[in-house]
Image: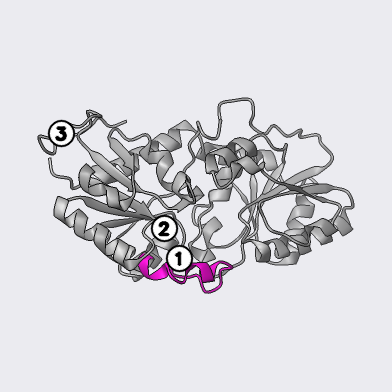
Amino acid sequence: MNAPIGNFDDKPWRSGHAVRIAVVLERYGNVMSPCSSIRLHAFTEQFPADVRYMLAEELVGFTPSVIIWNRSALPSVEDVDRLVVLAREIGAKLIYDLDDNLLAMEDHPERDAYIGLTAAVQRSITLADEVWCSTIALAEAVFDAGGKPLHMPNDLDPVLWEMDTPVRNEPDSGDPILRLVYMGTRTHDEDYRLLESALVLVEQARPGSFTLSLIGVNASSAVEHDWVRTLSPPAHTGAAYPAFVRWFVRQGPFHLGLAPLVNTRFNRGKSAIKVLDYAAINVPTAASSVTGYLEDFDDDRLLIENTVEAWSDALIGVVDRRVDLSAICSRVIERVGSAPFEAAVARRWARCVTGLRT
């Protein structure tokens, strides 16, 4: 990791680091949102800097060199404007992180909840010195919205995901039952309907050949099928992403992770984070052949056209062992672990200190 760079002023700081970074996180109640954990906290915790997680109102006494915020951490235009005025007064660099196209919520199940936030997102995009974007497609949308985007792909903290411990998924290649898993937020009803229709056809063609574990996905019709089991995280995990990850890595075993995604304007900005999530537990992914899963495709996932027939045909091929899941898995697990994570940390750190006065 990079060493701390030169002094920025003569004021001593308790950490001994010259660079001071304030991170204003999107929160769900008393905990940081999963997006904050994945996109910011995992990386900023590794920086050789005095990093503090603060409310915007606390920044004056800290006088940071860099201010980072994400998504709806600043929920109003007025909040964004106040932060920008403060940043200009103290000479702080402004970095906004975005992992979804929150300007394209018209087809999203949570669109009503974001009506009051869209203007703040637009203002954040416009006024930040740079906007870190999880995908190239999202970076293009940010550019069109008047921002200064920088493609900053997702990566996973190998310590949080316990990648070097025995808890990782180790499926039995000789298991006659194909064990599928679909993990996601509770906004994936439309995606699940596509998958459900395909799996009904698979069950008709190959009765008893698979099971599907649903985690998080809100699928009211799932109980109608004998091949579905719903796995619910314990109540104590709440909205805490680290607690969820610790629980998730102990589930399974699974042979294949599923990532159906309908082709909407919002979804075209989404990343292939599920590919990394599944890879972190040693599971390959079958995903819809849409922008989010095509953008960084490197023969490391099974891509399927977004039709019921294509999904059922592909999964029957997996059941019949005409698809080499082990080869796909061996390629995708190279995307996670210490080396890619350290490179991702270093890239973000380099952007934080670029342009700072020495």
Q: Spatial distance from mark 1 to mark 3, Cα to Cα?
A: 37 Å
The disc labelled 2 sits on which kind of residue?
Arg
Q: Residue at x 23, y 29 (%)?
A: 14
Residue 108 percent across, percent down from the top left: 56, 69
Whole-percent x, y for residue 126 in the image: 29, 66
Q: Which residues are magenta?
A: 102-120
- Disc with the residue nearer the chain's start (2 vs 3): 3
Image quadrant where one finds the C terminus: top left
Label 1, on which residue?
A: 102
Left or right relative to 61: residue 153:
right
Looking at the figure, which quarter contains the N terminus?
Answer: top left
The numbered mark, 1 or 3, whose residue comes first in the sequence reads: 3
Percent of width and height locating residue 30: 48, 47
Which residue is identified by label 3?
6
Q: Within 10 angstroms of label 2, few (less than 14), some, or many (20 or more) residues?
A: many
Q: Are marks 1 and 2 in contact (CB under 8 Å)?
A: yes
Dot 3: element: loop
Where's residue 103, x and y in %? Answer: 43, 69
Is residue 305 something that shows in the picture? no
**Residue 88 falls left or right of residue 150:** left
Q: Main secondary structure of the magenta part?
A: loop
Q: Which residue is mark 2?
A: 71
